[in-house]
Image (cartoon, rainbow, N blue to C red):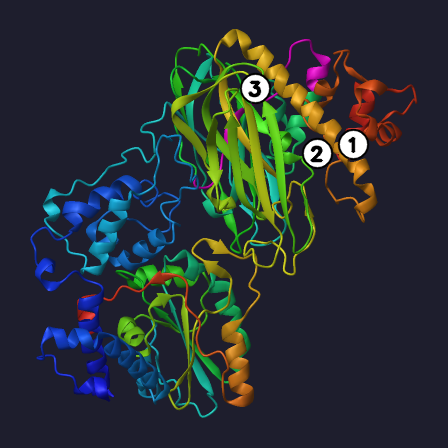
Amino acid sequence: MPAAKLSLSQTPQLILAFVSLLLSSAQVLAETDRDAASPVTSLTLLDIEGNSYQPFQNEKTKACVLVFVSTDCPIANAFQPELRSFHQMYAGKGIDCYMIYCAPRMTVAKVTRHINQYEVEMPAVVTDSHKIAKMVGATVTPEAVLVNRSGAVCYRGLINNLYAGFGKKRQQATKHYLRDACDELIKNGTVTTTSTKPIGCFIHFSPSAHQ
Amino acid sequence: MKTNTTYQWILLAVAGIFLISPPPTRAVEPSAVTFAGDIAKIVHRKCTMCHRAGQSAPFELVSYEDVRDRGATIEAVIHDDYMPPWKPVNDNVQFANDRRLTVKERRLISQWVNSGMAAGDLDTVTVPSFPDGWSLGKPDLVVQMNGEFKVPATGPDIYRSFVFPVSLPDDKWIKAIELKPSARGVVHHALFFVDTSGEARKNDGKDGRPGFSGMSFLSNNQRSRSRTSSPRRPTSLGGYVPGATPNRLPGDLALHLPKGSDIVMQTHFHPSGKSELESSQIAFYFTDKPPSQKLVPIQVPPLFGRFAGIDVRPGKSQEIRKSFTLPVDIQGIQISGHAHYLCREMDLQATLPDGNQLDLLCIDDWDLDWQDQYQFKQPVSLPEGTRLDVRLLYDNSEDNPENPYSPPKRIAWGRESTDEMGSITLHAIAKNESDRPALERGIRTHLIKSIREAGSSKISSATDTPKPPARGAGDLRLLLQRPGLFSRLDVNKNEQLEWSEVPETFRKRVFDDADLNHDKVIDQSEAKQLRDRLGGR
């Protein structure tokens, strides 16, 4: 990788000259990262009730969806009915779903209340949630990340187009990106639209989560 | 893999230093942006009023941690002009309580978020307090709704009126009203009325649930009015819409709350997907002295555009332009707009007799969820002969994300939130109180003229109209259910409608339906029977 050969001890002028190259290389690196086997395959997810899950341990699991949410992001909350319905429909098709809570200053009590209020049925993960977000590159709640058995991210971004922007909510969604991606993956093993730009509340990573 | 990730972070960090942050020599200056030094006062002044416990906003923005953890989101919604919510874009009049951020404030927030969100000396931060939980301080009176009304998770919109049996021993003068709904997410809007007749409380809870349905309270009062010599029509106290901030009326202006009267709150709910219980509180702020002048609403087009010909074809847009010329000198006090989902833009421009023009309200990104009443910082003087031009733009295309239908359907005027409405209301006082009757007469005449024009334009456009709009202009039967309209049409004030008093284009239909004894006169009894047959809403 040309970018990796650059030394940080070189003069600022040289670095400046390569800023655009750096950026594009970083982008390429990030893309490559996503396509390669991700650590998700060897991940152990611990839900709020203490159950642990290894996403691909079950032979029948075709893919898993990590949905990043928070307790008080209105946009993320507006998707809870769709997420419940999605889980009910796709659980039997070999798509396992996990709700990863990345809310500021979360407490178990707060998340438990949220789970009851919004009738969350999929496993709710609080432990290491920011590390998981970092690992798969999630930045927003709500954001869905679809990972196949080999650990490759096949789709990331919007659940559907219920929101066109901040405060721009449709009466109902007309494009169902996550469902379409799952249907395609189940049918063909590949996905056409691999990413959309998520709309919602940015996940706050405290400096320690950057490590 | 791990090496790649590490490099990726180093590279992004290096790029970040050069692209996002100021040059390193400036980044370490002591004047760096901090929460304590710069950000707290902006957030506390412009955000915390709603973003605090018990208010409508989804999370609190009070402490350093609150703001730090939302930093990136805050910057994004500011950049998007979504927050703070403030819809008017006209700058040639000043509004009280303008929540907009200045260019400098926006820049400071951006710099702070992108430079690591330093705390600064948090001991120097004064956290604003709202000891009474209300925006305007301790109210003079708080009334609580009787019981809880259950709004289901799904289903059609609900119109429900609730009675607050206030019944004060003395006359009061209201400077401000603040509503605290318990289920803010489902309250589309609420209108407040004074009921001096005691009719409303008789209807309260008749169906076993708090309040009573629909508009029957207004119709009942219309009937009781006809039987008594003194007018007992419910008077409006304004309303509540999400995102509105309560303001005290300026000067000595105040609204009358007669002794012994009740408050009726007519609420429009739209189910949110989650079942909710509504039990509102209303706070009143009084003054002892009656005002020297009365606030008059000038609505263009009248009746929320009932006769403005709003009828938007699927995939198309429609522009409505309506005007009203002031019959007397006035002073504008506050201004507000109302429309539903298809509306994209609305503005009211005043053209003074000398040709000068003044934008009183311009909204270029209308949003039903952020309606507000905008009070002018100083009353706006408009002389007799000033023309108020209102423009409303509707977009019924697929590109309008707020379009209630996909694919788009034809949408005309109607009461449901999936129908359309549209008007701008300028609340004003006559410059000389003695001119107020002339102003009110002018407004009444304007209403009747609008109805007549709607009738004739319907005929002239009949050839190119495939079918009349479902709830568009033309159905006068519904009009008879509206409070006060009977009497407005009743020009000679003999408490009945003669053939000549009903606009020509509506006559046949109205008299076919209502004139039971075929004497070419609709009396109160026939009007009542028609209302009853139509469901007595």
Real-space Cα separation, disc 3 to disc 1, in angstroms: 24 Å
Write down the residue under mark 2: B537
Q: Which amino acid is tagged 2?
A: Arg
Side of A12 where A166 appears, left or right: right
User: Secondary structure under badge 1?
Assistant: helix
The residue drawn where x is 39% and y is 28% is B247
State the residue lying farthest toward the top: B434
Query: Residue B158: image x %, image y %?
Result: 61, 43
Kindly indicate whether the residues beneath marks 3 and 2 are on one polypeptide chain.
yes
State which region is magenta: B224-243
Kindly indicate whether the residue at mark 2 contacts the one at mark 3 (C-beta within 8 angstroms).
no
Q: Which amino acid is tagged 1?
A: Ser
Side of A15 where B399 appears, left or right: right
The residue drawn where x is 78% and y is 31% is B532
Query: Residue B353: image x %, image y %?
Result: 53, 20
Q: Nearer the viewer, residue B383 or B522?
A: B383
Write down the residue under mark 1: B456
The residue drawn where x is 12% and y is 48% is B122
Write down the residue under mark 3: B326
Real-space Cα separation, disc 1 to disc 2, in angstroms: 28 Å
Side of A85 where A146 appears, left or right: left
Query: Taking B490 as reference, is A4 above or below it?
Result: below
User: Secondary structure under badge 2?
Assistant: loop
- Chain letter of disc 2 in the image: B
Real-space Cα separation, disc 3 to disc 2, in angstroms: 34 Å
- Chain letter of disc 3 in the image: B
Q: Nearer the viewer, mark 3 or mark 2?
A: 3
Query: Residue B339: image x %, image y %?
Result: 57, 41
Query: Residue A114: image x %, image y %?
Result: 39, 60
Please report whichever mark, 3 or 2, sits nearer to the chain's N-terminal start. Answer: 3
Disc 3 residue crowd, few under 14, some 14–19, many 20+, Cα 10 Å: many
